[in-house]
Amino acid sequence: MSHTKSPDRSNASTRTNNTKDDDRRALAGLLDELAAIYREVDASFAGQSCPASTECCRFGVTGREPYVTSIELALVQRAIATRGGARALGRTPPPLASSEDTSRGKRRLTTVDERVCPMLDENGRCAIYTSRPFGCRTYWCERATSPAGVDQRAINAFVRRIKDLAARHAPEGDLGRPLTRALAGAGASSGPGPRRRR
Ligand code: SF4
């Protein structure tokens, strides 16, 4: 029996491979552009600092969560894949120091109620730090210090650029979604869902 491919099938297969290569190159280009914007963001807000309490990574504590565009999610997914996939995440981080959550009159929450970001690792660090979304780079709580003040116009300008990039990445990619919902929607194979009850 001959294993020679028919010319038609062979051409279709080549076209499919070429399309995939083009898609991969296009995505890599957009991710490079996003990384360049993030470098500008980090440089612009280099004077900011905070006590690194990890409170902003506990969405049940803050009552809010970073929103991500499609291209930011793609970078997060790539970082997760680099770390071995979703199974490498979802570790139990150290608890919030009692001085952090009770001194300001907040009741102490259980780990489940805290809704900890799945990327917060067992050492209380972001497992995908260099790829974290824009919202995580500008998400300063009231204990953060900023010598020059927060430049809201600069933040808005960065948001516009990231949204423009996301619109080129996917239809409606510029519409931000809460990080955990976006990860869950991206599928278990490409990222973890919301933290499960332990
Ligand atoms: S992605 Fe990283 S910085 Fe952002 S909320 Fe999650 S653990 Fe915190």
Image (cartoon, rainbow, N blue to C red):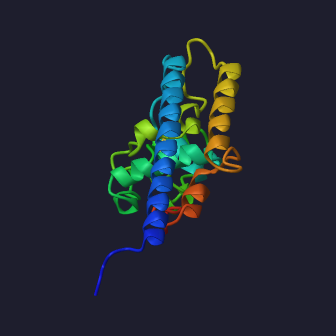
Q: Position of residue 190 (x, y in %)?
A: 46, 60
User: Which of 82 and 87 lies nearest the eye of the viewer?
Assistant: 82
In the picture, the quarter occupied by the C terminus is bottom left
Q: Position of residue 109 (x, y in %)?
A: 54, 56
Q: How many marks?
A: 0
Residue 187 higher or lower than 119, as above or below: below
* Residue in view at x 52 percent, y 32 percent: 33
Q: Is residue 50 left or right of residue 158?
A: left
Residue 173 higher or lower than 163, as above or below: below
Residue 196 higher or lower than 140, as above or below: below
User: Which of 14 and 186 lies nearest the eye of the viewer?
Assistant: 14
* Residue in view at x 42 percent, y 67 percent: 10
Q: Position of residue 147 (x, y in %)?
A: 56, 12
Q: Is residue 159 left or right of residue 29?
A: right
Which residue in the rendered view is the most extreme toward the top?
148
Q: Quadrant of residue 156?
A: top right
Residue 21 in view in this figure: yes
User: Which of 126 and 82 lies nearest the eye of the viewer?
Assistant: 82
In the picture, the quarter occupied by the N terminus is bottom left
User: Which of 25 and 197 lies nearest the eye of the viewer?
Assistant: 25
Which residue in the rendered view is the most extreme toward the left?
1
* Residue in view at x 66 percent, y 18 percent: 151
Q: Is residue 135 left or right of residue 128?
A: right
